[in-house]
Amino acid sequence: MDIEKEQQDESFKKGLEMRRSVLGAEYVDKSIAAADEFTEDLQRYLTSVCWGDVWNRPGLDRRTRSFLNLSMISALNRPHELKLHIRGALNNGLTREEIKEVFLQVAIYCGAPAAIESFRLAREVFEEIDG
């Protein structure tokens, strides 16, 4: 993907900045660099629409968006995305205690298996961060 060309698009530019800020520049740049003919449209779409348009809307702050993402991704059982967004939630100022509370809420409304997996993944992320 030609990132310099894409940055001419304002939504992509704003999305890339937000995406890097939340998920980490290393992860985002690696994802974009790995895009090929099959996946580059998805990378462009996610960066422009999800991160450029929706994440930059004024109606919710980044912390609130992270709270919502953790609960929705946990309910959908998407472990790779959940680990990524646990890191993002920490980057957006959520505490480990708040993340725990989200997953306790998940246990009630989405079931124990979703919460158990979410706690397990959160512990993995915390251990990676703590070294």
Image (cartoon, rainbow, N blue to C red):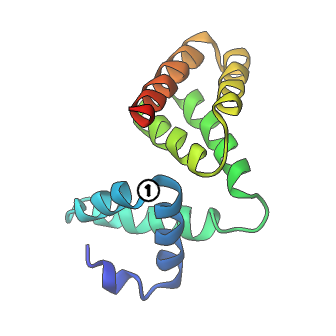
What residue sits 57% from the left and 50% below the top? 91
Q: How many marks?
A: 1
Q: Is residue 125 above or below residue 58?
A: above
Q: Residue furthest front?
A: 131
Q: Which residue is mark 1?
A: 24
Q: Is residue 17 visible?
A: yes
The reply, left or right, for residue 91 in relation to residue 83 is: right
In the picture provided, is 15 more to the left or to the right than 38? right
Position of 101 relative to 89 (above/below): above
Image position, residue 50 (x, y; %): 54, 61
Q: From the top left corner, tell me how far across and down residue 31 is, in percent.
A: 31, 57
Looking at the rendered structure, the secondary structure element under dot 1 is loop
- The kind of residue on which mark 1 rests is Gly
Q: Give the class, few, some or many, for how many residues have Cα within 10 Å of label 1's Cα (few <14, many ≥20).
A: some
Query: Which residue occupies 54% across, 48% down?
Result: 88
Res. 43 image quadrant: bottom left
Q: Residue furthest bottom?
A: 8
Kindly identify the residue that appears in the image at 49 percent across and 23 percent down: 123
Name the quadrant containing residue 107: top right
How far across and how far down the image is residue 99, in percent? 65, 31
Furthest residue toward top = 112
Q: Quadrant of the C terminus?
A: top left
Closest to the observer, 77 or 17:
17
Q: Quick check: 28 left or right of 82?
A: left
Does the rendering let one see residue 48? no
Please report the residue visible at 54 percent of the width from the left and 66 percent of the height from the top. 18
Q: Would residue 54 appear left or right of 6 to someone viewing this image?
A: right
Residue 81 versus residue 111 in the image, above or below: below
Q: Quadrant of the N terminus?
A: bottom left
Q: Is residue 20 above or below residue 115?
A: below
